Amino acid sequence: MFAFLRKTGKKDPHDLEQLIFDIAEHKRDSDFHHLYKMMVGRDVFAGIDPTSIPSFAKPGISYTTQASDRLVMKSVTIPSNGTWSSAATLPSHPSLKDGYVGMPWVDFLKMTLKLAELQGAMLQGKTSWIAFDKQRIAYVLSKADA
């Protein structure tokens, strides 16, 4: 009846940014669960060490990685908490200026879980960030596969 009241299914990045901020500030379980649902089907963007990017991959031009590529993902160190993978919600995030790869959120989490040297994953919004230890990542993945 009132089409303007129906949700279009479009993913509003502003809502995601507000949710990341709310989680960073309040750490409510309900916000985490809303984030898990919101991230299904979304891509995240992980910074790559520029020296590992193939020479024929040009800035600003999409490149599909090949099996022979050996990209090295940048990680972050949290004092007293070790090394963490890091991904941004937007490809324009300043941490990605030297090169990045886009990948599905779930694949980013699976990759993080497989790397023994990582303590977990950070998700960087435009202004806030949140961290997921490996126990939480395993939980998120168990719900994503359900």
Image (cartoon, rainbow, N blue to C red):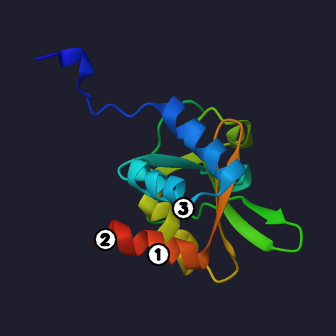
Identify which residue is drawn at 49% across, 77% down: 138
Q: Nearer the viewer, mark 3 or mark 1?
A: 3
Question: Label 2 neighbourhood size at 10 Å, few (<14), some (14-19), many (20+)?
Answer: few
Q: In the structure shown, which secondary structural element does the residue marked by tag 3 occupy?
A: helix
Q: Nearer the viewer, mark 2 or mark 1?
A: 1
Looking at the image, can residue 65 be seen? no
Q: Percent position (x, y) of residue 1?
A: 10, 17
Residue 68 vertical placement versus 87 (above, below): below
Q: Distance from label 3 to label 1 (Cα)? A: 13 Å
Residue 100 vertical placement versus 79 (above, below): above
Dot 1 amino acid type: Tyr
Identify which residue is drawn at 63% across, 32% down: 92
Dot 3 amino acid type: Asp
Disc ID at residue 139: 1
Q: Distance from label 3 to label 2 (Cα)? A: 20 Å
Mark 2 — residue?
A: 145
Mark 3–mark 2 CB contact (< 8 Å): no
| Total numbered labels placed on residues in the image | 3
Q: Nearer the viewer, mark 3 or mark 2?
A: 3
Which residue is at the front of the view, 19 or 119? 19
Identify which residue is drawn at 68% across, 42% down: 96
Q: Percent position (x, y) of residue 39?
A: 43, 50
Mark 3 — residue?
A: 29
Question: Label 1 neighbourhood size at 10 Å, few (<14), some (14-19), many (20+)?
Answer: few
Identify which residue is drawn at 51% across, 62% down: 108
Instruction: Return the residue found at the far bottom.
Output: 116
Dot 2 amino acid type: Asp
Q: In the structure shown, which secondary structural element does the residue marked by tag 1 occupy?
A: helix
Disc ID at residue 66: none
Which residue is at the front of the view, 132 or 98? 132
Q: Distance from label 2 to label 1 (Cα)? A: 10 Å
